[in-house]
Image (cartoon, helix red, strand yellow):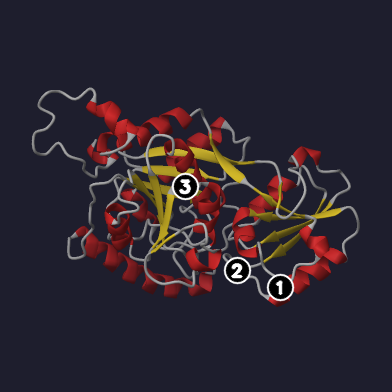
Amino acid sequence: MEGDFIKINEWLTPLSWLYGLGVGFRNHLFEIGILKSKSFDVPVISVGNITVGGSGKTPHVEYLIRLLQDKVKVAVLSRGYKRKSKGYVLANKQSTAREIGDEPYQIMKKFSDIYVAVDKNRCEGIERLTSDENTKNTDVILLDDAYQHRYVKPGINILLVDYHRLIIYDKLLPAGRLREPQSGKSRADIVIITKCPADLKPMEFRVLTKALDLFPYQKLFFTTLEYDHLQPVYCGDNLPLENIPEDMHVLLLTGIASPKQMIVDLQPFVKDIRPMTFADHHQFRKSDLRKLNEQFAAMPEPKMIITTEKDNARLFGLEGLSEEVRHHIYQLPVRIKFMLEQEQEFNEKIIGYVRKNSKNSILAKAKDDHKSKDSNRAGNGPRTISFRNN
């Protein structure tokens, strides 16, 4: 059921109250203009959440990339959480997960025709992407995990809410997992409830819609997870989940925020799942690899290892994996799927925003072909907009 992964540490509630004062004061400074949010002349779409931990940001960013990459020049800008580098870094073929972070590295490896950059200062990162010679043809920037980075005012602010960690049931850090009060959802133009069960009933959609209590300018969408074929990390062929032998023993290796959903999703295909879990964004050490080798060697045949794309970004190429592990380890790619036949509506909102605000893309050219004669008047240039003003 919704909210079933939430754990509240009630004894830490006083600290949550103090934390809330600090966050509320910061947000108030932005609301009254003492701290400034900057708009840009390039379409900017932010994807983020108000909770600590995974809500499906990377699969949703990848969905946006697939939607836009044939029409515009896409750039993804991330903080690059837990990377070892500093400042602005534009990813290239030689970049590593340690240099740019595991999630940007995953995106870079999957999408060769886009720009991937990291910068803790998102304003500076956007300015570099739009002014540097190698990237100034950027048409749209996707901000990964930037909902709390209020120094940038995105044209579309997408808030992701995990079905299993609904913000209406959660509390502020450190008692709960909220980064800011749930009232922060008011800044979102689009709210997506992610990781929904595929068999969600119509009544449940209505209950969730009422519970979130969004404003009229906000649009609510629902997505669920879909898995592609298992992909061998080192050698072998792709393997559909439904083709996993019934007697297979699986070591599930994860260093993500919420591995429980992955376990639930694999249970229809695998009877024996043995989780080996680490903290989110865990950097694998030699001792971890030894433990992995030993645990896998002790498992009965037939056996295999399944890991996530994000974990593989940190694991691939490390020395210390046994040959047995290398021959039996697979990554499981994940995609999102819109529910309630909402995909077209979502796509039209995104493409319409980019078309209206892009300068150099195919979409902008199509728009220019239909401009009226007075379209070159001052004030008709690209601008950052919000659906609430549309």
Say above or below: 201 vs 83: above
For the residues labelled 3 and 1, the Cα–Cα distance comes to 30 Å
- Give the total of numbered labels: 3
Residue at the (63%, 60%) spot, across then down: 311
- Across and down, in percent, residue 161 comes to 48, 49
- Whether pointer 2 and pointer 3 mark residues with C-beta atoms closer than 8 Å, the reply is no
Q: Quadrant of residue 290?
A: bottom right
Residue labelled with disc 3: 61
- Across and down, in percent, residue 299 comes to 87, 62
Residue at the (69%, 56%) spot, across then down: 307
Say above or below: 127 vs 225: below
Q: Secondary structure at mark 2?
A: loop
User: In the image, is 127 to the left or to the right of 328?
Assistant: left
Q: What mark, if any, has residue 288 been given in the picture?
A: 1
For the residues labelled 2 and 3, the Cα–Cα distance comes to 21 Å
Mark closest to the chain's N terminus, 3 or 1: 3
Identify which residue, 282 or 218, lies in the foreground. 282
Q: Amino acid at mark 1?
A: Asp
Residue labelled with disc 2: 282
- Across and down, in percent, residue 270 comes to 80, 47
Q: Quadrant of residue 321?
A: bottom right
For the residues labelled 2 and 1, the Cα–Cα distance comes to 10 Å
Residue at the (36%, 34%) spot, across then down: 351
- Whether pointer 2 and pointer 1 mark residues with C-beta atoms closer than 8 Å, the reply is yes
Asked whether residue 309 is in view, the answer is yes
